[in-house]
Amino acid sequence: MKTENWESRELIFPLLDPKLFPPERLFYWLALPRNPVFASPDPVAKMFIAAMLKGKKAQFVYVGGSTPGLPRIITPSLVFRHEPEGRIYVVGYCHIRAATRVFALDKAMVIWSRN
């Protein structure tokens, strides 16, 4: 009777947590060219472009991701799209998550403040 040695099996076939390894399609998406966007008629895109060019923070509510509706504050580093006339994204340092994140602009809502 053969008994299974779990320690050696885990060395050969490690148990991979899918949350630690993104899906394969994400790797292909990350490899696509990022074409900078410096002008847009969209007010949300304009806000991110201005913040990116001035090195300022941008505040918004994101209705996508793992916590929809969570207010975010980011310092944008790039506003881009993969294809001409395609979806616009912003990448930057998220001060809420303390990490670099990418956001789709069609899922972002501007928080207007009176100053």
Image (spheres, grey):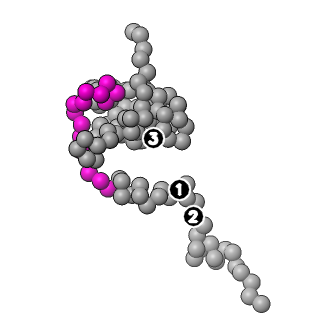
Q: Which label was assigned to residue 16?
A: 2
Q: Please say if 22 is above or below 66.
A: below
Per the rendered image, the range of residues in magenta is 31-45
Q: Which residue is mark 3?
A: 99
Is residue 80 on the magenta stretch? Answer: no
- Which is more N-terminal, label 1 or label 3? 1
**Which of the pair 66/83 is nearer the observer?**
83
Is residue 39 on the magenta stretch? Answer: yes
The kind of residue tagged 2 is Leu
Q: CA distance from mark 3 to mark 2?
A: 23 Å
- Horizontal side of 55 relative to 109 (left or right) equals left
Percent coordinates x, y for residue 35 in the rendering? 24, 44
Decide if residue 104 is in sight here: yes
- Check if mark 1's residue and mark 2's residue have beta carbons within 8 Å: yes
Q: Which residue is mark 1?
A: 20
**Which of the pair 115/110 is nearer the observer?**
110
Label 3, secondary structure: give it: strand
Percent coordinates x, y for residue 81 in the rendering? 28, 43
Percent coordinates x, y for residue 107 in the rendering? 43, 35
Label 1, secondary structure: give it: loop
Q: Residues within 10 Å of mark 3 (few under 14, many from 20)?
A: few
Percent coordinates x, y for residue 24 in the rendering? 43, 61
Which residue is depicted at the point 42% across and 14% down?
113
Which residue is depicted at the point 39% across and 39% down?
104
Which residue is depicted at the point 23% across and 44% down?
84
